[in-house]
Every structure is written in structure tokens, then in C-alpha cells.
Image: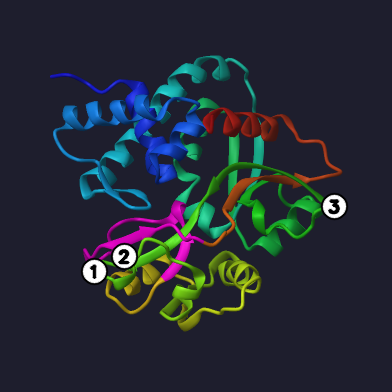
Amino acid sequence: MKQPSLRQIQYFIAVANAGQFSRAARELSVSQSALTNAIKQLEEIVATPLFKRHGSGVSLTYEGSNFLVHARRVLAAVDEAVRSPGRKRDGVTGPLRLALTYTVAGYYIPPYLEQFQRSFPGIDLQLTEASRVAIEDGLVSGSFDLAVMLTSNIVDQEGLKFETLMQSRRRLWLPSLHPLLSQSNITLADVSREPYIMLTVDEASNTAQRYWNKTAYRPNTIFRTSSVEAVRSLVASGMGVTILSDMVYRQWSLDGRRVEVVSLADAVPTMDVGLAWAANVELNRAALAFREFMHIGDQ
């Protein structure tokens, strides 16, 4: 049986993240035809469509969503195999007090933590989940060495240094068969006429307010919740729509209903995830090792 190549898997992940072949091709610096052919060959190997094509781009099929989980694990395992032996010889030891925001803890960092612990068994990783305010205060006061958080939310621009590891697009979530799905160009004005489910965790509602305030429209919020899964289930059941990042998007709610996602015509800022630390503190060896590890892992 023919096996997918690493390049095909990389191309597949890029298209899944970008939602468009053209955008993924630009990000990979390859021709769109090369990318399209690679995905076509991959779909032939797995004997099922991985993407559903539509006017504004592509979205994952059910099989594509399942394949994406395994594809990311494959690349993570290969990356770890390449870099792990040399790192274990470094002999870095000691505690690393790492702070995480809720969204990062649930939807981004777990696979990296697993790989980091295997690569650096001598580091005592001490994890704390906290709000953005508590993390900023903890970094400045010395309670935390390093944080993985939403860098797009950081307020203390002078007391902290930070760098972005990844940017996640925010797109519109809709229930299946929603009338807007047949519309080629969806704007915030269109969204404002729909019942809206507002996520509040990690200051999501504050972020939403900032980009809505740049328009003449406002979301018709009928329910506010700190649970991403509650938002997903409510959208899937037809109670409303929402705008959230691709990082927390999953096609299926807990009760097995489908959530569709489409890009908006209006500019909506990305959700940026990255590292932060105190500006006036020199990072210890454990923190430096984690910082380097995360940069290599996101290449």
C-alpha cells in the first residue's frame, strides 16, 4: 500500500490551516498547481475526499478532520525525532514555572508539553493556568518564568517582552444549512442580523468588541458563555452564529452535529499565540530551552 509523503502531509496541514489553496501556496512558497496535485494524490492514497470545495475556499470533510489530527501527530513525531537526541545531551535541569491561559492550555500547548518533557527530562515543569491579568502580574513580579498566552491580548507592552508563535484566523461559525452558507460574500453587517453566541473566556468578548466597534454594527448577542464547547453545541443546533479562531474550531459538536465555517469579507484580526516574559529579567536555562523548543516546533 502506498504511503503519503511528508511533503503531502505538510501541504495538507497548510491548506487545512489556510482554508484556501492559493493562500497555502503563498505561505509555502510553492505553485498552486503543485499544491493542488499533492493534495489530489493524497486523497487518492487515502481513498476519500479530505476537503470540501466551495466559493470562498475549502473546508475539511469529516474524514479530513480525522486525518488532520493524525497528520499533526506525524509531523510532531518526526520533528521530535530529529531534534530530541541532541537536546537530551544538553543536560538542562531545574524548575520552569510556566503560565498558560485557558485557550492555550486546552487547544494549543498539550502536544508541545509532552514532547518537551521527553526532550528535557531534567526540567521540573510547573504549570499554572491563569488569566491574562494574573499572568502579566506574575511575570513582572517573578512568580512565573515564562508564559504561553494570547499575545494579541497583552496590555503591559513595556513590562513584558513577547513573541508570536502562531496566528489563528477568526472565521464565522454557522450551523449546517444556514442561509448565509449560500451567500458568496458575508460581512459583519450580515452577521449583526443573526442571533449571536458570545464566548467570554480569555477576554474573547473584549476582543470581539474592539473589531465590532470599528464598524457601524454590533452583534445581536443572545447568550454569553465561557465554554467553547457550549458555543459549538449552540451554533450546531441552530441557536445562533459566532466568530471564533480556527485554533478552537472543530467540525462536530459533542452531540454529533456539524458546525460550518466560512471566511468574512470584513477584516477581522487573528488570534495570536506566543511566549511572554518579564522585560527586565534574564531567562534561566530551562526557560531558554523551552523558548528555543517552541520556535523549532512551530517551524
Give the distance between the C-alpha atoms of the residues marked 1 and 2, in whole angstroms.
7 Å
Disc 2 residue type (three-letter): Leu
Pointer 2 with pointer 3, Cβ within 8 A: no
Q: Is residue 61 left or right of residue 127?
A: left
Specify the label residue 181 is tagged with.
2
Up-down relation of residue 280 to residue 242 (above or below): above
Q: Quadrant of residue 91?
A: top right
How is the structure coloured here?
A: rainbow
Disc 3 residue type (three-letter): Glu
Up-down relation of residue 12 to residue 244 (above or below): above
Say which residue appears at 30% left-offset and 36% top-offset: 70
The residue singled out by tag 1 in the image is: 177
Pointer 1 with pointer 2, Cβ within 8 A: yes
Q: Quadrant of the C terminus?
A: top right
Q: Quadrant of residue 136?
A: bottom right
Let me know if residue 275 is in the magenta part.
Answer: no
Number of residue marks: 3
Let me know if residue 257 is in the magenta part.
Answer: yes
Q: Which residues are magenta?
A: 242-265
